[in-house]
Image (tube, helix red, strand yellow):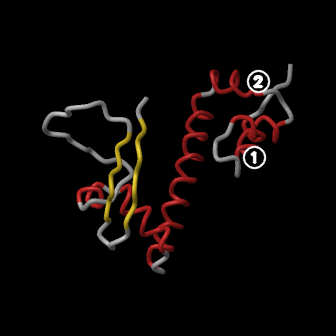
């Protein structure tokens, strides 16, 4: 059975985003060997979590840079994911309510949505 030492683990972890498969590949061992190592070494688990946090930090930094440059994809990302953006009508979820009675079966519903920039989107739902 392959053994992992602390120095080799730290070196293998770099640039893996905390993905066990990549760590195992860098160590030239099976994933199970890495999992067994992690069970025995709490500090190694913490290093993996830190690697994952570093990736999120990098992504946030890149998003901030793109937002500062006015890149539309970054602006949309912020508006769709930030609660205040959602409160202003941006988001990938919508709540629809129907009040009243329906006299017959509905086989298709069409909803037209006009976003704050005036772009129209139509959504269709078909019922069988």
Q: Secondary structure at mark 1?
A: helix
Of the two numbered discs 2 and 1 on the same chain, state the one appearing first in sequence. 1
Q: Residue at x 43, y 65 (%)?
A: 76
Q: Are marks 2 and 1 in contact (CB under 8 Å)?
A: no
Residue at point 61%, 40% (across, down)? 48
Q: Dot 2: what SS?
A: helix
Total marks shown come to 2
Q: Quadrant of residue 86?
A: bottom left
- Label 2: which residue? 33
Callout 1 crowding tier (Cα within 10 Å): few <14, some 14–19, many ≥20:
few
Q: Nearer the viewer, residue 68 or 93?
A: 93
Could you say where residue 88 lies in the image, as x and y percent from the top left?
A: 24, 62
Residue lying at the far front of the rendered structure: 104
Q: Which numbered marker is on residue 55?
A: none
Residue 123 drawn at (x, y percent): 40, 51
Q: Quadrant of the N terminus?
A: top right
Q: Is 6 left, or right, of 112 in this rendering? A: right
Q: Which mark is residue 11?
A: 1
Front position among marks 2 and 1:
2
In the rendered image, the residue lying farthest to the left is 100
* Rendered view: 15 above or below 106: below
The one of 125 and 18 positioned closer to us in this rendering: 125
Q: Quadrant of residue 81?
A: bottom left
- Crowding at dot 2, Cα within 10 Å, few <14 / some 14-19 / many 20+, comes out as some
Left/right placement of residue 29 relative to residue 45 reads: right
Residue under the image location 76 percent in, 27 percent down: 31
């Amino acid at each position: 059975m392959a053994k992992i030492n602390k120095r080799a683990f730290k070196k293998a972890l770099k640039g893996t985003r905390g993905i066990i498969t990549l760590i195992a590949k860098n160590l030239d061992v099976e994933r199970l060997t890495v999992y067994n190592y992690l069970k025995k070494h709490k500090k190694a688990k913490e290093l993996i979590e830190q690697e994952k946090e570093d990736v999120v930090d990098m992504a946030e930094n890149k998003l901030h840079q793109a937002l500062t440059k006015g890149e539309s994809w970054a602006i949309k990302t912020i508006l769709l994911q930030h609660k205040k953006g959602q409160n202003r009508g941006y988001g990938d979820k919508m709540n629809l309510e129907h009040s009243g009675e329906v006299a017959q079966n509905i086989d298709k519903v069409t909803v037209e949505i006009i976003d704050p920039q005036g772009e129209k989107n139509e959504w269709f739902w078909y019922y069988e």
